[in-house]
Amino acid sequence: MIKEFCVWLNATSLSQHIQDALWVIPTVQTVHIVSIAIVMTSMAMLDLRLVGIAGRRQSLADMAHRFLPWVWVALVVLLCTGTILIIAEPGRELINNVFWLKMSLLAVALALTGTFQLMLRRSKTFWDRNRTAAILLGSASLLVWIGIIGAGRWIAYVEHG
Amino acid sequence: MIKHLLSFMEATPWGTAVRESTWLFPTIESIHVLALVLVVGSIMVVDLRLLNVASRQRSVKELTEDVLPWTWAAFGAAAITGTLLFSSSAIRYSGIWQFEAKMCMLVLAAINMGVFHLGAFRSVTHWDQPNVRPPVAARLAGGISLAIWVSIVALGRWIGFA
């Protein structure tokens, strides 16, 4: 099923056009990496603040207000650039275990970030009062985002369709 | 002279190890990517504050004190992993124009940073107020820095396609 979809997508004129224009893939990857820089730095700041290692001069609620809007916008950019990269080389991503590992980790990361935001919306001091939960969520989130970056780079190095 | 240095780098135990192993290069490269996104992302936090785009309520001085130690730590990791990757094929990389341009851009980023720290940043206490637009020299430094770092990411990615 996926294999047939990849063959079809690869043969579309859009995919062929992207493959023929040599500048498209590196340019889109550059936008992808800059967006990852925005997401990763913002999440690292929030996660380290949750754990209690960094940024303690500012309240968690203020920090989330500062960084989360950038995270969600950058994630939309990542979705768009990622989709272009899949259209350009479908088999490289869709028939690749590391790509699906990255997507699974992304689902976990989004669930953790959603939980963080939801509880903060219910009570601005929720994470200050539940320190154990804050430390667990912060460290889990940080590790998962690091895993996403590692998996993202490894997509290029494993066997794919 | 330079040629000797490049050959020497390739012949070092780590240069040889990275070149001959199948998993070392992508593993070190993953750490390099993690480090560089933290460098670029944290510098963007400062640049966007100087440009009066983000974190406007925060003091510039406090913000830089909070962020820049992490930037330097990540830069150290990026420099070490970058040197290891370079050592694996020093002669080849040194001949790629995108690599040379990336190194030039790093020097420009350092000069821009130096000019800002010795210039506009010295009087930071005079203009560092929430919701007040930083002086033109500070905004200029932020804008130039942003452009330089995006170009560093682009050139770095292009090395892989050269």
Image (cartoon, coloured by chain):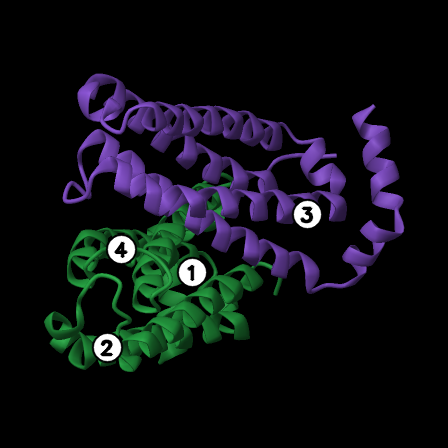
Chain colours: A purple, B green
Task: Identify which residue is drawn at 31% across, 62% down.
Answer: B49
The mark nearer the N terminus, 4 or 1, is: 4
Q: Mark 2 — residue? A: B116
A156 or B73: nearer the viewer? B73
Where is mark 3, residue-wise?
Answer: A85
Instruction: Please tell me which residue lies in front, A17 or B14.
Output: A17
> Which picture quadrant has residue B161?
bottom right
Say if labels 3 and 1 share a chain: no
Which mark identifies residue B69? none
Q: Secondary structure at mark 4?
A: helix
Q: Residues within 10 Å of mark 3 (few under 14, many from 20)?
A: many
Instruction: Indicate the amino acid at tag 1.
Output: Phe
Looking at the rendered structure, the kind of residue marked 4 is: Thr
**Above or below for A22 versus B30:** below
Q: Are marks 1 and 2 on the same chain?
A: yes
Q: Which residue is mark 1?
A: B86
Type of the residue with mark 2: Phe
User: How crowded is the residue under tag 4: few (<14 C-alpha within 10 Å), some, or many (20+)?
Assistant: many
Q: Position of residue A26 (x, y in %)?
A: 62, 59
Q: Is residue A73 left or right of residue B126?
A: right
Residue on which the image places disc 4:
B71
